[in-house]
């Protein structure tokens, strides 16, 4: 046996002491190794055979184990196997030693689970270098295990949070109302909790409101935006507010919550079955599609607006498109995750494929067909964004209704019509609107009775819009004799000076099961007023105030509502 | 708006037609103002037979007339109002302020 180059011990660099377990049945060899290793500052424990090795290992785990291959009772290979079992997922270097220098044996040793193989006589320099190298690896491994368990804990926590958010969202989105509304939809989230959401409810007037929302971000940051959005939606839709009022309110609510870059793309849909009309407010989503029975695309509702929360007041646009359908159809809205879902070659599913799918599929199968086509397109590749889609049935209702009174009435009163006028400053100055509107109403078949009531209400709303909204007149001037003169003079003067200002009037006649109704909507460009008090006062009190006006209209109207800043008003009259 | 002096000389008859709102205020006032200070006239009669359309400013104008008339110990009477117009006057209790014929 060669003595090691002990003299070269001095040339070794300073080493970190290791706990070494040396397993060899050769006493002399053990002595030599122990001497060398101890000289290097390591702590050596030895075992003469496999059993001793195992018990030594378990009582005081070493950093490295040196194992002689050829031992009686339990040879090196078997010991390695046992040690691996004890270690489980952990790792520490197991080095096998043997007088056999054969490569094949080396290979076998490595295959059985050793980390290295040293031929005897041991080159101590080599051994030392290897020990260092293994030490580095062992440290790395320990770090990995630690990080793994930290990551596991973190992941569990995140999972729990996501489940919690999912629960909250479930309750807040009023899943039961969604189920009752009769619309069909699917949402395929990329993670536990989706940034996409579908909500639906009916207004007291029987209109169906649907919202498809796609919040930017994921998880908690998306949830934070969706919660106020959905609450506002249910509150306002449940009262039958117009879509633009809802959108404006939601935008206002989301502005403070949204950090730069966070917003909610959404489509707000209002189906008015009695009018065979559907309205869409689209802010940031791909176009909603109206498909008829046969699969033809009858209308695309493109995004005309910014997503909710993206921009503040003056920049916020509020464009609604409405569509009167002449036959049964479906309105389909979806998030961009659907058309952007990619296949293996990064090709998106795209609008063309979507429209084709809708065209071909039988109408009751469109939703499912769309879903399966997208899945087929992606062929199992993960989607980058939540995919959601909603289908709203738009059945055509006819004006003929057995419950309506059988009195012979002119055809015109049973038909439905609507007009929208927008008057700007030049027209507000020049046009005497009321006679024109009354003539229109009579031409549309309103009875003299109904025309009188229409005048009463329309005049009030229009004059309020003009005088208080656009001209900013104070009606208290009208209290005295001189006051009337002053008021009228002031009104005329301001009107003559008027450069800017706008009043939009919408009239619509609707047929309901209990008769026909005239809906009047007036929006002025003025600052509005605090209308909560109007809504809360009983009629008798309201009559006393402000020259009878509002009290009277409330008395004659089926409904009177103010919206927005108080610059939008809607009234409904039986006619 | 026509006035017909061929009645009880104590009556001043004002016949209105069509609409009765802010737009017709000046005309309306011109039809009664001259007689306010006429001691012979005891009663101002408003004939609403042809009035189809009123709004809330009509109510204010009627009140104004009534105040002016009362100050001069004259009464105001509304005749032949019908339909919605009558209904409105009753709803706001004007039938207690004006005799409705």
Image: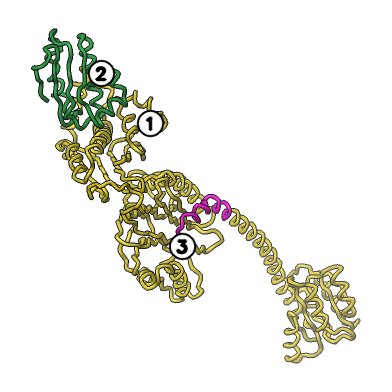
- Identify the coloring: by chain
Magenta-drawn segment: A165-186
At which x and y percent is residue B79? 20, 22
- Position in image of residue A54 (x %, y %): 86, 75
* The C terminus of chain B sits in image quarter: top left
- Above or below, comparing residue B7 to residue A419 in the picture: above
Q: Is residue B81 in sight in this rendering? A: yes
SS at circle 2: loop
Name the residue at 34% across, 29% down.
Answer: A551
**Would residue A169 appear left or right of A534 to someone viewing this image?**
right
The residue at which mark 1 appears reads as A534
* Magenta-colored stretch includes residue A167: yes
Q: Residue A45, which numbered label?
A: none
The crowding category of the residue bearing disc 2, from other C-alpha atoms within 10 Å (few below 14, some 14 to 19, many at least 20), is some
Q: Which residue is mark 2?
A: B98
Residue that label 3 marks: A388
Tag 1 or tag 3, which sits nearer the N-term? 3
Marked residue chain, label 3: A
Residue at x 76% of width, y 79% of height: A127
């Amino acid at each position: 046996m060669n003595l090691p180059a002990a003299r070269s011990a001095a040339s070794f660099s300073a080493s970190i002491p290791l706990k070494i377990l040396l397993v060899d049945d050769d006493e002399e060899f053990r002595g030599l190794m122990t001497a060398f290793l101890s000289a290097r500052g390591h702590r050596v424990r030895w075992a003469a055979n496999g059993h001793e090795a195992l018990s030594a290992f378990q009582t005081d785990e070493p950093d490295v184990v040196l194992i002689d291959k050829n031992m009686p009772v339990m040879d090196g290979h078997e010991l390695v196997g046992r040690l691996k079992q004890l270690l489980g997922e952990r790792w520490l270097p197991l080095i096998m030693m043997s007088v056999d220098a054969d490569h094949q044996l080396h290979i076998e040793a490595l295959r059985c689970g050793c980390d290295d193989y040293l031929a005897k006589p041991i080159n101590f320099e080599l051994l030392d270098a290897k020990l260092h190298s293994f030490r580095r690896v062992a440290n790395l491994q320990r770090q990995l295990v630690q990080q793994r368990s930290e990551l596991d804990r973190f992941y569990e926590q995140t999972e729990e949070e996501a489940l919690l958010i999912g629960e909250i969202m479930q309750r807040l989105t009023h899943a039961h109302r969604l189920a009752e509304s009769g619309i069909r939809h699917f949402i395929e989230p990329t993670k536990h909790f989706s940034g996409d959401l579908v909500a639906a409810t009916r207004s007291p007037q029987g209109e169906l409101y649907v919202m498809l929302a796609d919040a930017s971000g994921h998880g908690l940051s998306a949830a934070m935006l969706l919660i106020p959005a959905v609450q506002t939606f249910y509150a306002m839709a449940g009262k039958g507010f117009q879509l633009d009022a809802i959108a404006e309110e939601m935008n206002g609510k989301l502005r403070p919550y949204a950090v730069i870059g966070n917003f909610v793309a959404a489509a707000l849909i209002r189906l008015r079955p009695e009018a065979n009309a559907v309205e869409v407010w689209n802010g940031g989503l791909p176009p909603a599609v109206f498909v008829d029975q046969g699969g033809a695309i009858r209308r695309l509702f493109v995004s005309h607006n910014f997503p909710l929360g993206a921009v503040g007041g003056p920049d916020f646009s509020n464009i609604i498109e409405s569509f009167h359908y002449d036959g049964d159809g479906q309105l389909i809205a979806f998030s961009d995750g659907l058309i952007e879902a990619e296949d293996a070659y990064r090709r998106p599913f795209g609008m063309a494929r979507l429209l084709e799918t809708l065209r071909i599929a039988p109408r009751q199968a469109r939703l499912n067909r769309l879903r399966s086509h997208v899945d087929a397109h992606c062929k199992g590749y993960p989607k980058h964004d939540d995919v959601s889609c909603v289908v709203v049935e738009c059945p055509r209702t006819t004006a003929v209704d057995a419950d309506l009174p059988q009195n012979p009435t002119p055809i015109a009163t049973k038909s439905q019509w609507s007009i929208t006028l927008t008057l700007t400053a030049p027209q507000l100055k020049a046009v005497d609107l009321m006679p024109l509107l009354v003539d229109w109403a009579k031409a549309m078949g309103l009875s003299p009775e109904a025309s009188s009531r229409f005048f009463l209400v329309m005049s009030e709303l229009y004059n309020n819009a003009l005088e208080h909204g656009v001209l900013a007149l104070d009606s208290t001037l009208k209290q005295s004799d001189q006051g009337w003169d002053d008021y009228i003079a002031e009104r005329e003067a301001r009107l003559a000076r008027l450069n800017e200002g706008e009043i939009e009037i919408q009239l619509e006649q609707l047929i309901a099961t209990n008769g026909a109704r005239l809906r009047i909507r007036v929006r002025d460009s003025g600052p509005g007023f605090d209308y909560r008090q109007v809504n809360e006062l009983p009629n008798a009190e309201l009559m006393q105030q402000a020259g009878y006006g509002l009290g009277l209209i409330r008395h004659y109207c089926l409904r009177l509502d103010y919206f927005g800043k108080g610059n939008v008003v809607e009234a409904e009259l039986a006619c | 708006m026509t006035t017909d002096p061929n009645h009880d000389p104590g009556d001043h008859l004002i016949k209105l037609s069509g609409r009765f709102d802010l737009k017709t205020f000046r005309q309306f006032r011109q039809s009664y103002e001259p007689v306010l200070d006429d001691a012979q006239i005891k009663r101002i009669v408003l004939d609403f037979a042809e009035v189809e359309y009123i709004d809330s400013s009509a109510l204010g104008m009627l009140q104004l007339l009534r105040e002016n008339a009362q100050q001069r110990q004259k009464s105001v009477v509304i005749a032949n109002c019908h339909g919605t117009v009558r209904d409105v006057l009753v709803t706001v209790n004007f039938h207690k302020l004006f005799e409705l014929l």
